[in-house]
Amino acid sequence: MSNEKDMSEEEYLKKHLSSIEGSNDNFSNTDIPFVAQPKVDTTKASDLQYFNFNVQELPCGEFYPTGTLFMVRPAKVKEIQSYSMVDDNNFYDIVEKMNDMLQSCVRIKYPDGKFGTYLDIKDQDRLFIIFLIRELTFQQGNNLVVGAKCPVCSSEMSLELKRENFVYHPVDEKLDKYFSLSSRSYHFSTVNGRNFELTPPNIGLQKAFTDYILKENNEKRTPNLSFLKIIPFMLYGRTTITYEGIKAKLREFEEIDDISFQFLNAAVSKMTFGIKELKKNCSCGEEVHTEMQFPNGASGIFVIHDAFEAYIKE
Ligand SMILES: [Zn+2]
């Protein structure tokens, strides 16, 4: 298992379960100092100004209807206050606080004129949009950076956590020909005569499954991890599912034939989207890559690490 910090369902579950057990060190605190890089920027946003954003730029962009518009605004102080209380050692809380931020700052408009909510956002797009909100919120700079060394000329580099430096997980090209442009999902037919439609789950489903996992844990039942890995990808068109609905899906899943299970397990394993790593060109021309991580923990995305030093009047 890699230690990438994106939130594929599988990673999410593992991190979630490990945080329940109280042994979570998934978000390294490397204590890299906040680097202020003030720049001249005349596009100062007012609190309520929304910026239109092309969904095609998102890691899961192709899974939204063509013409879908995301409207994103900067975080207000009260939203940053709420986010600032995130428990950096609790993956569940990090996801919850990020979801709250998306709920406040993102509006979705579909090409048919209907509006969606943050629950429609693909789970694996969460982190990207959080960083988009961060860019809009801190337009005067306040870069989060990860240090790296150029393997060619040994220069010390600072890779900023911002969109232009993000590298996404590559999509397995074997999936391409099964993608339907009309439904924006994958359609597979298997040798045993079954048909499956798969699409990355949205935040609405993620929340429903998180509630399910918590309930099972509270009642001392061990969730079926294979089920939790695969089934959220099989709920096309839904933004929620009840506890009883999940139980019914679990009973179906436990009765599934061998070929279908093996196929689905392999197909979902190919559906890792989101931010894989950071990259930036060194002055020597080499493209330097480094692992995606949160300097100063997940709270550091919106809480300025050394605000005391930065803002005290000497
Ligand atoms: Zn170099």
Image: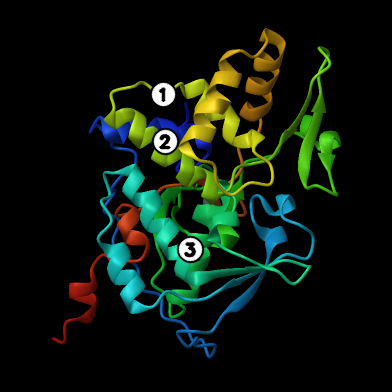
| Label placed on residue 102 | 3
Please tell me whether residue 179 is drawn above or below residue 190 in the rendered image: below
Looking at the image, the residue that sits furthest to the bottom is 42
Look at 59% across and 30% down and name the residue there.
231
Q: Which residue does the numbered mark 1 point to in the structure image?
A: 223
Helix, strand or loop at label 2? It is: helix
Q: Residue 311 sits in which quadrant?
A: bottom left
Number of the front mark, 2 or 3: 2
Q: Residue 69 sits in which quadrant?
A: bottom right
Label 2, label 1: how many angstroms apart (C-alpha)?
A: 9 Å
Looking at the image, the residue that sits furthest to the front is 244
Can you see residue 177?
A: yes
Label 3, label 1: how many angstroms apart (C-alpha)?
A: 28 Å
Neighbours of disc 3 within 10 Å: few (<14), some (14-19), many (20+): many
Looking at the image, the residue that sits furthest to the left is 314
Look at 31% across and 52% down and name the residue there.
297
Look at 46% across and 36% down and name the residue there.
243
| Label placed on residue 212 | 2
Q: Is residue 186 left or right of residue 289?
A: right
The residue nearer to you, when weighing 103 against 242, is 242
Q: Quadrant of the C terminus?
A: bottom left
